[in-house]
């Protein structure tokens, strides 16, 4: 009979300074076994990980190390003749963690039953010098969240829209199993994943290591599940419209169905995992949509499938496929009486990845992977020649669009082939060395037809003004790549860690750009700009050093500091739109053209912090960060004369001429490993100021004719005070409760009133962006769930849950117009964040 | 912590949770706002003007409409309405006429396209000229006005003051509501004949008559 002991054991895990062991999907389990009585190391202890067919043996001093362990939760067994066997339950391996599990064994002449001990993830990683938050699958399952972005929004230093530490949302890079899953033309995550496919989510908001590149603000690393050694199937159904519409209008008419399955195909050799989700929704605007379209307005199908083949105990082959198919229609409040005038949208992406990982020795391993990612997006249906190109029609009061269609059609495709390899070696006890290379080959195609009426700053159409033409077509094959070296040095005598890394990135746009020459006009200081031809855009490269230091200052406290150069190549649309040589020779008609010579945006960031464990399960930390970003992309007007290439009218192009500065301090307190009550709370004070907050800003100011103040201003996501809390508790009747509180102080908007929508009320008033503040925002989200055991063996469970968002139905303001009106003159309800929504669901697993 | 305390705290938490749950099913209405087009954006005033000249001896009724909306209004004119002039002491004497774009005397109106433009705070004016003959063909100069010799001029007579209600109701655009300003009471002392100012002192018609 097994004796089960539950004890809270703090296991000090030494963590790499966010250096991923295998691009953020795997970890290392290591530690030392000693005799409980003599305290001597025990040689030859077998350490095995259940379900992984991985293991190791302690050396002459009792140390062991098991590399290349996939992130997840496992039982670890310690056994050797002459000692009582021990099973450590629920050992969590999180990506980018080197989990240390020390063990004391009791000598025993006779064979005793194995002792089971439950362990928890250590609260303090004394040598963690980066700002990192890791969330496991159980936690993700219990949180009232649906998407990866919603999980990110719960972390300190982030906003609801996904800004991290004061940066733009496009400055965040998303990885799935170590390989980027980005939309390189428009920005953002390139696909959606079934929630049940995620085993761990690691969010780096600062100090990420040399192996992470092309990111300025944050790195979101998603690790997906792998096959298991027994067959499991799960089904989940969730809806927010269980009640009739007449009873409950607080819904999006949303339904989600999810299927998962995993298991062995060949015992101990070949296993599979698959998850698929189908989501349907009419959005919060269903009352208007139903006048034009049948349900469902938004359809989303996503899935993931994996095969893992263990060729030998030291070599694994894995194959992974991801698909994400999304179709929807846009909604704009001013189009609510003519919603079929807005184009239909779709976005389909696929990724196939094959990889091999091999453990070369007890201390070294390598991985090689290849992936092919395809993303196709469409705006509009049918052929682009079907567009009428006529302006749409406003109502008499110039408020609603009542007839006509938006002249917008697009067909874009991006294919990214990635080859990646890295090698990891534990050299001695002190050096954890890693190096890697990556090559990306892109095939980018975009065909866009877009004509928009000229409007004033205040949104009113300018009568008789010609339409603005944003149309363009391009096809390019750029390349990028990187190489990095990093070493984490652990000083055993005091437990401090020094991490050093350097990264080299290159980008070859493989395109031409117009040559703009500046010709002096006679003897004056004036000049004219002349387009005289085209030239090949330059090959770009960058070296980025990263340094981090973590040093303990007490048994449960440590100090850390990190510094680094980070950069990100601009989105491809800013490089290539409108510079088709044929189009240029015909005379540039586009409003805004790309610039393949754009430099990467660069950030210099440093952080300093302190962490302290108050008790075994309560820890607090304080972190100060500062981030200066330069070379931000904006637009500039170029007006060429006498140019046979560019015609006789002007155009604007993207340039690197803006910068921003973000600074802040974060306080976090966490309490874990208490079923009755656990969770965390954070407070952040942060300022974010800059010269430009979106890429078209300068050209818009020029068109509107505003005298713009030449100073930095608070950016739209500058929320000075942010407070977040997450409380988990076990209620009576076995109900699991998870409460989230999100608060941020008022964000800025631009107050620049008008009386008629065409001219400012005070023409002499200088236009200062973001010169006023909106209202504070407060959300309360709650998830309750109850699990029922349907069968003990084989284990099958039924979980019923209620997921409530904004349960107090607070009206949180999202935007205010330049006259200070929430929702503008139409009182657009979209000026508020989503009202209360409750989803009820059930999940069966067997 | 004692067991009883633990139970009490758990129950309190549970009760709070149930209350929160109950909020889920309360207040479940979420209608989208109805469309409320701006109303009463055109404000009107009506006035009278007695025109006494060598070539004219009429009462002009003028309706002034102002755009009080913050936007420029521009659309095909749909001017349709009426003027009504009513003798205050005997309402059986009245004149009603239909207003159309031909009554427009001021405003940015393109007669070729029919498009009328009213910028914010600008006006249009509609005018009718009345010859004192009512809807039944009765001439008020014979039946109603009571003339007295003009003590200042032997060549003309001035009628005793009569009051007229001036009313109007007109639609300017199809999308706007009808403009119906409050009725105006206009005093009129009709003069039987115009006399050259070189012969007699002129009669002022721009001020109320005595």
Image (cartoon, coloured by chain):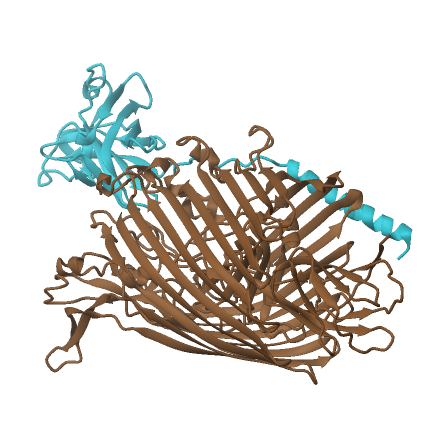
Chain colours: A brown, B cyan
Query: Depth check: A701 or A547 in front?
Result: A547
Q: Position of residue A780 (x, y in %)?
A: 63, 50
Q: Nearer the viewer, residue A812 or A659?
A: A659
How many numbered circles does the render carry?
A: 0
Do we see residue A547 in this rendering? yes
Left of A46 or right of it: where is B158? left
Q: Nearer the viewer, residue B103 or A644?
A: A644
> Which residue corresponds to the image point at 29% horizontal and 29% vertical from the top-left?
B170
Quarter-of-image position of residue B107: top left
Which residue ends up furthest to the top in the rendered image?
B136
Residue B30, x across and y down, in percent:
54, 37
Split into 4 quadrants, where in the image is the C terminus of chain A? top right
Indicate whether B44 appears above or below A440. Answer: above
Residue visible at 17% across and 77% down?
A526
Residue B144 appears left or right of A762:
left
B122 horizontally vs A667: left or right: left
Q: Residue furthest bottom?
A: A493
Is A584 located above or below residue A844 in the figure? Answer: below
Q: Position of residue A472 (x, y in %)?
A: 24, 54
Task: Determine if residue B210 is in view.
Answer: no
* Residue drawn at (40%, 46%) of the image: A348
For the point 25% across and 56% down, the residue is A474
Residue B74 occupies which quadrant of the picture? top left
Residue A127: horizontal and vertical position, in percent? 64, 76
């Amino acid at each position: 009979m097994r004796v089960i002991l539950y004890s809270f054991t703090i296991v000090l895990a030494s963590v790499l300074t966010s250096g991923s062991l295998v691009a953020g999907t795997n970890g290392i389990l290591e530690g030392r076994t000693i005799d409980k009585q003599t305290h001597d190391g025990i040689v030859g202890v077998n350490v095995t990980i259940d379900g992984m067919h991985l293991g190791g043996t302690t050396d002459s001093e009792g140390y062991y190390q098991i590399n290349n362990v996939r992130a997840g939760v496992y039982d670890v067994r310690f056994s050797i003749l002459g000692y009582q066997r021990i099973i450590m339950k629920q050992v969590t391996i999180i990506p980018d963690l080197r989990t240390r599990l020390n063990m004391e064994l009791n000598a025993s002449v006779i064979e005793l039953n194995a002792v089971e001990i439950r362990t928890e993830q250590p609260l303090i990683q004394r040598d963690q010098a980066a700002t990192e938050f890791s969330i496991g699958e159980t936690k993700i399952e219990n949180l009232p969240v649906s998407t990866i972005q919603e999980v990110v929004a719960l972390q300190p230093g982030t906003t609801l829209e996904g800004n991290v530490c004061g940066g733009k949302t496009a400055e965040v890079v998303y990885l799935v199993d170590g390989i980027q899953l980005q939309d390189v033309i428009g920005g953002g995550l390139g696909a959606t994943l079934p929630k049940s496919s995620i085993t761990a989510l690691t969010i780096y908001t600062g100090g990420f290591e040399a192996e992470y590149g092309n990111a300025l603000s944050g790195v979101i690393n998603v690790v997906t599940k792998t096959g298991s050694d027994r067959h499991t199937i799960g089904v989940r159904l969730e809806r927010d419209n269980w009640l009739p519409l007449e009873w409950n209008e607080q819904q999006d008419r949303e339904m989600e169905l999810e299927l998962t399955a995993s298991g062995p195909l060949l015992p101990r050799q070949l296993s599979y995992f698959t998850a698929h989700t189908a989501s349907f929704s009419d959005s919060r605007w269903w009352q208007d949509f139903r006048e034009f379209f049948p349900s469902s307005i938004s359809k989303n199908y996503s899935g993931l499938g994996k095969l893992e083949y263990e060729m030998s105990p030291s070599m694994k082959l894995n194959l992974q496929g991801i698909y994400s198919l999304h179709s929807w229609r846009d909604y704009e409040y001013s189009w609510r009486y003519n919603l079929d005038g807005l184009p239909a949208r779709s976005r389909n992406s696929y990724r196939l990845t094959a990889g091999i990982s091999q453990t070369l020795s007890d201390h070294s391993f390598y991985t090689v992977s290849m992936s092919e990612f395809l993303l196709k997006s469409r705006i509009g249906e049918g052929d682009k020649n079907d567009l009428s190109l006529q302006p749409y029609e406003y109502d008499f009061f110039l408020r609603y669009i009542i007839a006509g269609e938006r002249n917008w059609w697009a067909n874009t495709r991006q294919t990214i082939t990635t080859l990646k390899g890295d090698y990891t070696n534990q050299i001695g006890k002190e050096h954890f060395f890693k190096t890697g290379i990556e090559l990306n080959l892109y095939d980018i195609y975009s065909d866009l037809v877009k004509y928009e009426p000229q409007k004033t700053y205040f949104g009113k159409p300018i009568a008789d003004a010609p339409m603005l033409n944003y149309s363009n077509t391009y096809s390019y094959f750029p390349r990028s790549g990187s190489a990095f070296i990093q070493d984490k040095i652990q000083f055993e005598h005091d437990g401090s860690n020094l991490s050093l890394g350097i990264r080299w990135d290159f980008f070859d746009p493989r395109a031409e750009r117009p040559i703009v020459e500046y010709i002096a006009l006679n003897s004056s200081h004036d000049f004219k700009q002349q387009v005289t031809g085209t030239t090949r855009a330059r090959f770009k490269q960058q070296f980025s050093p990263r340094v981090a230091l973590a040093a303990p200052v007490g048994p449960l406290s440590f100090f850390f500091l990190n510094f680094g150069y980070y950069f990100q190549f601009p989105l491809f649309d800013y490089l290539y739109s409108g510079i088709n040589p044929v189009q240029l020779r015909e005379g540039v008609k586009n409003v805004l053209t790309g610039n393949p010579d754009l430099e990467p945006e660069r950030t210099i960031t440093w952080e300093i912090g302190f962490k302290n464990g108050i008790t075994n399960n309560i820890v607090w930390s304080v972190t100060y960060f500062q981030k200066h970003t330069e070379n931000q992309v904006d637009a500039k007007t170029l007006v060429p004369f006498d140019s046979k290439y560019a015609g006789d009218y002007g155009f604007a192009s993207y340039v690197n001429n803006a910068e921003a500065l973000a600074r802040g301090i974060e306080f976090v307190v966490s309490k874990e490993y208490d079923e009755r009550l656990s969770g965390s709370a954070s407070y952040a004070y942060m300022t974010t100021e800059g010269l430009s907050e979106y890429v078209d800003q300068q050209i818009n100011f020029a068109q509107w004719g505003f005298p713009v103040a030449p100073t930095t201003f608070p950016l739209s996501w500058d929320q000075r005070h942010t407070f977040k809390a997450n409380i988990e508790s076990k209620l009576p009747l076995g109900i699991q409760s998870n409460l989230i509180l999100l608060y941020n102080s008022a964000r800025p908007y631009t107050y620049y009133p008008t009386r008629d929508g065409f001219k400012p009320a005070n023409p002499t008033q200088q236009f200062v962006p973001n010169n006023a503040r909106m209202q504070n925002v407060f959300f309360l989200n709650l998830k309750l769930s109850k699990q029922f055991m349907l069968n003990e063996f084989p284990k099958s469970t039924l979980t019923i849950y209620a997921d409530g968002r904004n349960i107090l139905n607070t009206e949180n303001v999202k935007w205010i117009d330049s006259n200070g009106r929430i929702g503008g003159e139409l009182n657009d309800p979209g000026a508020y964040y989503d009202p209360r929504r409750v989803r009820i669901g059930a999940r069966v697993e067997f | 912590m004692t067991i009883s305390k633990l139970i009490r705290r758990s129950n309190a938490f549970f009760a709070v949770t149930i209350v929160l749950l109950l909020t889920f099913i309360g207040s479940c209405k979420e209608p989208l706002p109805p469309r409320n087009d701006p109303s009463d954006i055109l404000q009107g005033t009506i006035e009278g003007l007695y025109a006494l000249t060598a070539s004219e001896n009429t009462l002009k009724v003028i309706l002034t409409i102002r755009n009080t909306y913050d936007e420029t209004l521009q659309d095909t004119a749909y001017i349709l309405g009426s003027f009504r002039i009513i003798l205050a002491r005997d309402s059986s004497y009245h004149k009603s006429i239909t207003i159309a774009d031909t009554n427009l005397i001021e405003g940015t109106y393109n007669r070729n396209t029919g498009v009328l433009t009213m910028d914010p705070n600008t006006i249009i004016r509609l005018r009718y000229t009345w010859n004192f003959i009512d809807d039944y063909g009765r001439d008020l100069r014979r039946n109603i006005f009571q003339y007295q010799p003009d003590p200042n001029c032997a060549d003309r007579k001035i009628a005793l003051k009569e009051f007229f209600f001036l009313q109007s109701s007109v639609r300017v655009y199809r999308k706007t509501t009808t403009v119906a300003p409050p009725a105006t009471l206009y005093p009129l002392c009709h003069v039987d004949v115009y006399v050259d100012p070189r012969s007699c002192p002129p009669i002022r018609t721009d001020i109320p008559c005595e």
